[in-house]
Image (cartoon, helix red, strand yellow):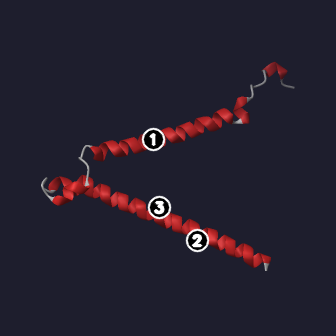
Amino acid sequence: MNFFFEENIFITKNIIKEMFGLAALAALVFGYIYYLFWVIILPFIPEDHSVQNYFLDSKYAFILPAFVILSIITSVMTYLGYVLINSEKYSKPLPKPWELK
């Protein structure tokens, strides 16, 4: 009975992970299609068309991705720096060569 209960918890956790992955994939696909429409198709639509109200200016189509990429790179480098600074391997001073025996 105990094994069956643990197996159900494992299956439930896997279903939750799969649903989260599906939601993340759907959000990324929607964002990619929205961005492609914004950058490639929208410049050929007249300015007075009602679909123009759903998008920002085209200059933001290049500023926003640059900001996102810069934020990701900054976050990764900050995390790596934090790990290296707090790592015991790198925080201890190295012994002098004449002290090694």
Tally the numbered discs.
3
- Residue type at mark 3 is Ala
Examine the rendered structure and indicate whether residue 44 appears above or below residue 74: below
- Residue type at mark 1 is Ser
- The crowding category of the residue bearing disc 1, from other C-alpha atoms within 10 Å (few below 14, some 14 to 19, many at least 20), is few
Examine the rendered structure and indicate whether residue 54 appears above or below residue 58: below
Q: Quadrant of residue 54?
A: bottom left
Q: Residue at x 74, y 78 (%)?
A: 4
User: Sequence order check: which comes first, mark 2 or mark 1?
Assistant: 2
Q: Residue at x 87, y 26 (%)?
A: 101
In what quadrant of the picture does the N terminus appear?
bottom right
Q: Secondary structure at mark 1?
A: helix
For residue 24, the mark is: 3
Q: For this view, does 59 lie left or right of residue 46?
A: right
Q: Secondary structure at mark 2?
A: helix
Task: Quickly name the residue at label 1.
Answer: 71
- Residue type at mark 2 is Ile
Separation of marks 2 and 3 at Cα, in angstroms: 14 Å
Q: Residue at x 41, y 59 (%)?
A: 28
Counting from the top left corner in percent of width and height, residue 48 is at 12, 55
Separation of marks 1 and 3 at Cα, in angstroms: 19 Å
Q: Most extreme residue toward the bottom, as rendered?
A: 1
Q: Secondary structure at mark 3?
A: helix
